[in-house]
Image: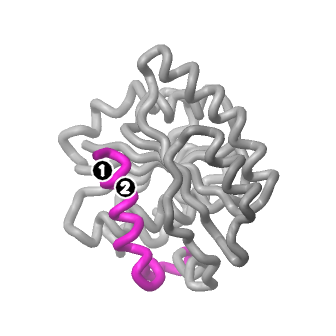
Amino acid sequence: MRIVAFVHQKGGTGKTTLAIGTAIALAETGARVLLVDADVQGTASEWGSRWGQRWNVVCRSQMQPIIHEQTARFERMFDWMIVDGPPTVSDMTASIFKAADGVLIPIRPSLPDIWALESLAALHERLTSEGNAGTVFVVWNQVVDPPTEGMVAQVSAMAWPVSPRLIPWDAAWMQLMEGAPVPDDSGKYLRALATGILS
């Protein structure tokens, strides 16, 4: 089972939407997909209770920071575990970093989103030094106007790979919560991100 997580300390960056979209995109290939909701807001769980069966995505809520201890029990049942992380740097975030093979960090072209990366970077660096963290990849998300050169430079300073493709803001993303498919060709892109971060 391959494990990909979506995390960011800042709320509103699109973690949940991209986690759901990635789960749908992978399930469309026939993969067995588990979507783990580790955010107390419970949006992914609510989506799963309404639409998970439609898209062949199994959704589970996990509010205790033990995700890294629970992965083995799902290994034979699923091909993918997609984790929707909370908007915090906490024990739960550390558990997700430890569990995930790859972590995708969505950011908007917004300085507060970028500033909040510093705490995540410090946590990831500590866990990496202990041998307990997967690969990190940054994705520009909800883009209306592209990031400025200054924004790009600040993100590049984190020394994490950054996706060259920007995910544009699109009203169709909101329709995921109504059971709609992933907009346009974004499904292919999300599948490529999920598999690419593990290669």
Between 35 and 46, the one lying in front of the other is 35
Residue 165, given in percent of the width and then of the height, sits at: 50, 68
Which of the two marks, 1 or 2, is nearer to us in this view?
A: 2
On screen, residue 72 versus residue 183, left or right, reads left
On screen, residue 178 versus residue 73, left or right, reads right
Q: Quadrant of residue 1?
A: top left
Between 148 and 14, the one lying in front of the other is 148
Let me know if residue 40 appears in the view. no
Residue 178, given in percent of the width and then of the height, sits at: 54, 80
Residue type indicated by callout 2: Ala
Q: Residue at x 43, y 80 (%)?
A: 181
Please, what secondary structure does the residue beneath circle 2 have? helix
Alpha-carbon neighbours of circle 2 within 10 Å: few (<14), some, or many (≥20)? many
Above or below, comparing residue 54 to residue 118 in the picture? below
Q: CA distance from mark 1 to mark 2?
A: 10 Å
Please, what secondary structure does the residue beneath circle 1 have? strand
Q: The magenta stretch spans which residues?
A: 177-199
Let me know if residue 79 appears in the view. yes
Q: Residue at x 48, y 23 (%)?
A: 128
Q: Which of the labelled discs sits on residue 80, or is there none?
A: 1
| Residue located beneath label 2 in the image | 194
Residue type indicated by callout 1: Trp
Between 64 and 109, the one lying in front of the other is 109
Q: Is disc 1 in contact with disc 2, using a CB cutoff of under 8 Å?
A: yes
Between 170 and 28, the one lying in front of the other is 170
- Outermost residue, top side: 130
Q: Which of the labelled discs sits on residue 176, or is there none?
A: none
Above or below, comparing residue 136 to residue 165 in the picture? above
Residue 14, given in percent of the width and then of the height, sits at: 62, 62
Above or below, comparing residue 191 to residue 113 in the picture? below
Q: Residue at x 24, y 38 (%)?
A: 75
Above or below, comparing residue 119 to residue 195 in the picture? above
